[in-house]
């Protein structure tokens, strides 16, 4: 197996899950990686493991470098099973290893998943472990995005093992940012942030503050490529995402039954275009919620159109609003629109849900009975253009 060298004596031994398309429910387009790192020193440390079905490949990659039985420390930065799933297989192979996890939530999580029979060692923020020439320092990042999360810093190598933070669902046989297409990786990092970390903006800000105090050459996340030449770029992106800085972009998202709401949506988009705003139009019957949320990280406007179905919103609109409510995008402006036959409740429901999500409503709900006339469409366009 080709050894992936991060720095002399430090190896990337994780796996590429090329064909994954649903990451616990949100969709991804390129698969992902589960990164694990082996540090060869007087003591040998493994930082994180991989999803359980890939345990054998992880052990094979470690075995190409050293007998797994010689591992002294297995460091679990995060209990979630994409990183901890192979802990039983690794601990079975590394009989003398201590299992390092955060106090108190790491050990609670690991024992709940894998039992209490491992030689656990709990660490707190600021604790260190000496490997010989190198030390590892643990930095707590609770709720980024589970209660147990921590990141591990090696000052001698200037490497931050950041776990989920700064990760992307990007797949490659290369491991560094300067070996792949950078804009794609940065965009995939935005998608990762949108669908995993968006609810935890304040914790992200704390993590950025912690990172700013470190001397860094490489940020090595647990998903995707490692940031070597461009680590400052991804930290700056995270600053933008967590700071809720928006761009002059509008997302016009709609569902439609007989194309009336679609006609309205297209004129809403025209209105934004008229005012010089970048527009992205999404038909919920064919577009992916995860992709929409990726754009929502930086978009300023969110217009949601929905016809009335059985006095309610459509199921697809319900899914959008539920997902939005959970992820909690901040600093958005928006409005509701849609067509109806007799009741017209859906548009008010959407308006109410947008308010509940925290969207600043900049236009009253726009309802049109049955089929919009040319004059009504013109009016919609002009209203949006004058926001
Ligand atoms: Fe990549 Fe939260 O696990």
Image: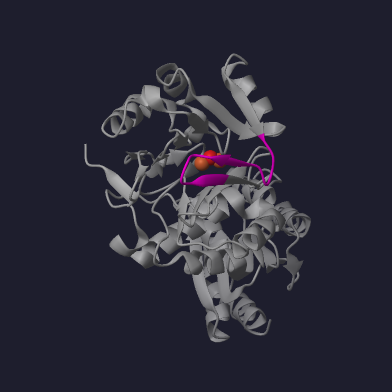
**Residue 371 appears in the picture as rendered:** no
Front in this rendered view, residue 233 or 159: 159
Residue located farthest toward the top when viewing the structure as drawn: 117
Quadrant that contains the N terminus: top left
Q: Residue at x 61, y 33 (%)?
A: 101
Q: Position of residue 109 (x, y in %)?
A: 64, 27
Q: Is residue 9 left or right of residue 294?
A: left
Evaluate whether residue 20 shows in this view. Answer: yes
The answer to which of 335 and 4 lies nearer the viewer is 4
Where does the C terminus fall, quadrant-wise?
A: bottom right
Which residues lie in the magenta part? Answer: 123-136
Residue at the (66%, 62%) spot, across then down: 209
Question: Who is closer to the viewer here, 282 or 305?
Answer: 282
Q: Nearer the viewer, residue 327 or 261?
A: 327
Q: Give the image location of residue 178, x and y in percent.
A: 33, 64
Position above or below: 381 against 99: below
Please say if 219 is above or below 301. Answer: above
> Image quarter for residue 384?
bottom right
* Quadrant in which residue 105 is drawn: top right
Query: On the rendered structure, is 359 left or right of 29?
Result: right
């Amino acid at each position: 197996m080709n050894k992936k060298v991060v720095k002399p004596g430090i190896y990337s031994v994780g796996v590429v899950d090329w064909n994954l398309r649903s990451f616990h429910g949100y969709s991804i387009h390129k698969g992902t990686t589960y990164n694990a790192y082996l540090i060869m020193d007087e003591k040998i440390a493994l930082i994180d493991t991989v999803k359980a079905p890939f345990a054998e490949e992880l052990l094979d990659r470690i075995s190409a470098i050293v007998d797994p039985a010689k591992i002294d420390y297995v460091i679990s930065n995060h209990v979630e099973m994409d990183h901890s799933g192979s802990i039983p297989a690794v601990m079975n192979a590394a009989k003398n290893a201590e299992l390092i996890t955060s106090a108190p939530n790491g050990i609670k999580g690991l024992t709940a998943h894998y039992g209490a029979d491992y030689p656990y060692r709990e660490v707190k923020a600021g604790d260190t472990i000496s490997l010989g020439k190198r030390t590892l320092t643990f930095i707590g990042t609770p709720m980024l995005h589970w209660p147990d999360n921590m990141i591990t810093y090696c000052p001698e190598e200037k490497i931050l093992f950041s776990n989920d933070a700064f990760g992307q669902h990007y797949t490659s046989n290369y491991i560094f940012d300067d070996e792949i297409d950078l804009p794609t990786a940065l965009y995939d990092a935005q998608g990762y942030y949108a669908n995993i970390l968006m609810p935890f903006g304040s914790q992200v800000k704390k993590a950025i503050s912690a990172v700013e105090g470190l001397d860094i050459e490489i940020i090595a996340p647990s998903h995707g490529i490692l940031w070597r030449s461009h680590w400052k770029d991804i930290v700056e992106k995270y600053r933008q995402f967590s700071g809720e800085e928006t761009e002059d972009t509008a997302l016009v998202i709609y569902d439609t039954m007989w194309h009336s709401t679609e006609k309205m949506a297209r004129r809403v988009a025209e209105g934004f275009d008229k005012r010089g705003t970048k527009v992205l139009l999404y038909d919920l019957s064919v577009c992916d919620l995860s992709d929409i949320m990726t754009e929502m990280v930086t978009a300023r406007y969110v217009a949601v159109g929905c016809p009335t179905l059985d006095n309610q919103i459509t199921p697809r609109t319900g899914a959008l609003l539920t997902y939005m409510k959970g992820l909690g995008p901040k600093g958005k402006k928006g409005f509701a629109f849609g067509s109806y036959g007799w009741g017209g409740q859906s548009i008010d429901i959407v308006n109410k849900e947008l308010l509940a999500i925290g969207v600043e409503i900049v236009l009253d709900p726009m309802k049109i009975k049955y089929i919009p006339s040319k004059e009504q469409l013109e009016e919609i366009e002009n209203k949006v253009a004058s926001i």
